[in-house]
Image (tube, helix red, strand yellow):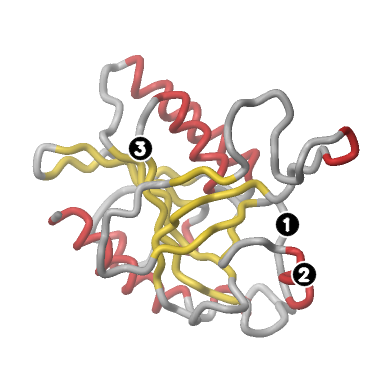
């Protein structure tokens, strides 16, 4: 992990795993890899931001990026995250709306920065499960991932704005093998790199 400093701003790029970090992105930044899922993402992001805070080097922006699934958005296209929700949270049995964390004064959908006018912004759902096929019927969002909500909560604690960028790797068809996820990652790598260039030049 290394902060990227450009145009007087510091950026921390955060990704889940190296499989999403191809040759184009690797020319642009050195990310924090969190591992897969909300727990690993929260653990890694919290440790990194706490360490940076203690050294007086918090970034101006955190950028969470990588792949996402969707059964409605175009495969390999890249989208900004307009809002992120936590699909695992369900305390409806004691009277809370699904997605609302009990006794926490935040909305079920957290708004994120979407600073790029030429990149469409869509709603994202984070959870600890792989979504495929008929399971999309239960998702109240345009796309799904496994890390962004957790990273957003860590950023909130440190008052650092979060930008989410996701390329659609799967969702058009049922997932049956890991290759169904990885087959388009090299294309998404190049498209994310182009979007990152626009972000850093803005």
The N terminus appears in which quarter of the rendering? top left
Pointer 2 residue: 135
Q: CA distance from mark 2 to mark 1?
A: 10 Å
Residues under numbered marks 2 and 1 in contact, where contact means CB atoms less than 8 Å apart = yes
**Label of residue 39 in the image:** none
Q: Residue drawn 42% across and 56% down?
A: 65
The residue indicated by pointer 3 is: 161
The label nearer to you, 2 versus 1, is 2
Q: Is 26 situated left or right of 198 in this image?
A: right
Nearer-N-terminus badge (2/1): 1
The residue depicted at 49 percent of the width and 39 percent of the height is 152
Q: Which residue is found at the position 54% from the left and 65% from the top?
A: 68
Find residue 23 and report its image quarter. bottom left
Q: SS of the residue at dot 2?
A: helix
Per the image, label 1 sits on a secondary structure element best described as: loop
Query: Does 18 sit left or right of 133 as displayed?
Result: left
Could you tell me which quadrant the C terminus lies in? bottom left
- The CA distance from mark 3 to mark 2 is 31 Å
The residue under label 1 is 129
């Amino acid at each position: 992990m290394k902060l990227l400093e450009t145009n007087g701003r510091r950026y921390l790029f955060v990704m889940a795993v190296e499989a999403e970090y191809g040759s184009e992105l690797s020319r642009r930044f050195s990310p924090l890899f969190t591992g897969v899922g909300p727990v690993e993402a929260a653990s890694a992001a919290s440790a990194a931001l706490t360490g940076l805070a203690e050294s007086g080097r918090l970034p101006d922006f955190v950028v969470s990026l990588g792949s996402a699934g969707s059964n409605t958005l175009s495969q390999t296209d890249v989208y900004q995250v307009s809002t992120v929700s936590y699909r695992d949270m369900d305390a409806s049995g004691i009277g809370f709306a699904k997605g609302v964390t009990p006794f926490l004064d935040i909305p079920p959908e957290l708004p994120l920065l979407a600073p790029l006018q030429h990149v469409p912004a869509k709603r994202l759902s984070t959870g600890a499960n792989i979504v495929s096929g008929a399971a999309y019927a239960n998702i109240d969002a345009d796309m799904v991932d496994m890390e962004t909500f957790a990273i957003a909560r860590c950023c909130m604690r440190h008052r650092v704005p979060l930008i989410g960028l996701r390329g659609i790797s799967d969702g058009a068809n049922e997932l049956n093998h890991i290759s169904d996820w990885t087959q388009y990652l090299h294309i998404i790598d190049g498209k994310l790199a182009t979007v990152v260039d626009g972000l850093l030049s803005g």
